[in-house]
Amino acid sequence: MNPPPEIRFTLNRLDLLDWTWGYVLRSRVLLAMSLLSAGFVTWTSHRAGRPPAFLVTSALLTFVGEWAGFLILIPLMALARRHPKFLGEATVRADDAGLHASSHRGQSTVTWGTFERVRHGRRGMFLCLTSSQGIVIPHRAFPRDDDRRAFEAFCAGRIARAQDEAKAGDAAMR
C-alpha cells in the first residue's frame, strides 16, 4: 500500500474537547475514584443503619454525579486554558519510517513503534502514544472520507507491524 499524501490542518478547541472527553471516558483512575466514593457512601450509610434502598440509591447518585462532574468540569478546564501555540496549523506526512509532523513550533518524527493504537473520535482520529497522549488529526483534514480511511488503515497497519516486530525481537532475545 502506498503511503498517503501530506495533509494540512489547523486544530481548534473542539478537537481538544473531543480528545478530552475520550480521555475522561477511558480513565481508569477516575473510574476507581468514583467506585471508591460510591463504596464509601454505601459503607457509611450501612453503618448508620440506613435501609437497603437508600444504600443503592445513594451509591448510584454518587457514581453518576461524579461522572457527570468529570465529563463537564475536566473538559471545561481544558478549554479554559490558553493554547495559542498548540492550536496552530500543522502538516502531517506518514511513510514507512513513521509519522512526520511540522508546525510553526518545529518538526518531529515519531516512529511507528512508539504508538500504541489508533482511536476514533466524533470529529477526528487519534494516534495514541499513551492513554493520555496522542496526535489529533481532525476528519476535516481529509478531502474525502475514503482518504481518511486509507490514512487510518495505513497508520494502523504500520503500528501493528511495528508491534509484531517488537514482539519478535523480544522473543529472539529470550
Image: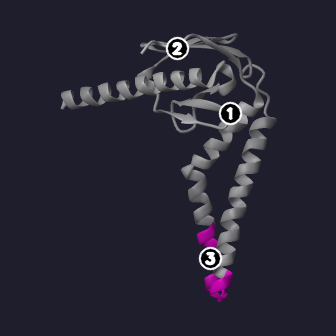
Badge 1 density bin: few <14, some 14–19, many ≥20, Cα 10 Å? some
Dot 3 falls on a residue whose secondary structure is helix
Q: Quadrant of the N terminus?
A: top left
| Coloration of the structure image | one colour
Q: Quadrant of the C terminus?
A: top left
- Rendered location of residue 5, percent (x, y): 56, 10
Instruction: Name the amino acid, label 3.
Output: Thr
77 falls in the magenta region: no
Q: Image quarter for residue 166? A: top left
Instruction: Name the amino acid, label 1.
Output: Arg
In front: label 1 or label 3: 1
Badge 2 density bin: few <14, some 14–19, many ≥20, Cα 10 Å? some
* Residue pointed to by mark 1: 123
Q: CA distance from mark 1 to mark 3?
A: 39 Å
Mark 1 / mark 2, whichever is N-terminal: 2
Give the residue drawn at x 66%, y 88%. Answer: 51
Disc 1 and disc 3 in contact, CB within 8 angstroms: no
Q: Image quarter for residue 80? A: top right
Circle number at residue 42: 3
Circle number at residue 136: none
- Is 112 left, or right, of 71 in this rendering? left
Instruction: Name the amino acid, label 2.
Output: Pro
Which stretch appears magenta? Answer: 38-54
Query: In front here: 67 or 155?
Result: 155
* Residue pointed to by mark 2: 4
- Against 121, residue 168 (above or below) is above
Mark 2 / mark 3, whichever is N-terminal: 2
Instruction: Please state the total of marks drawn on the protein image.
Output: 3
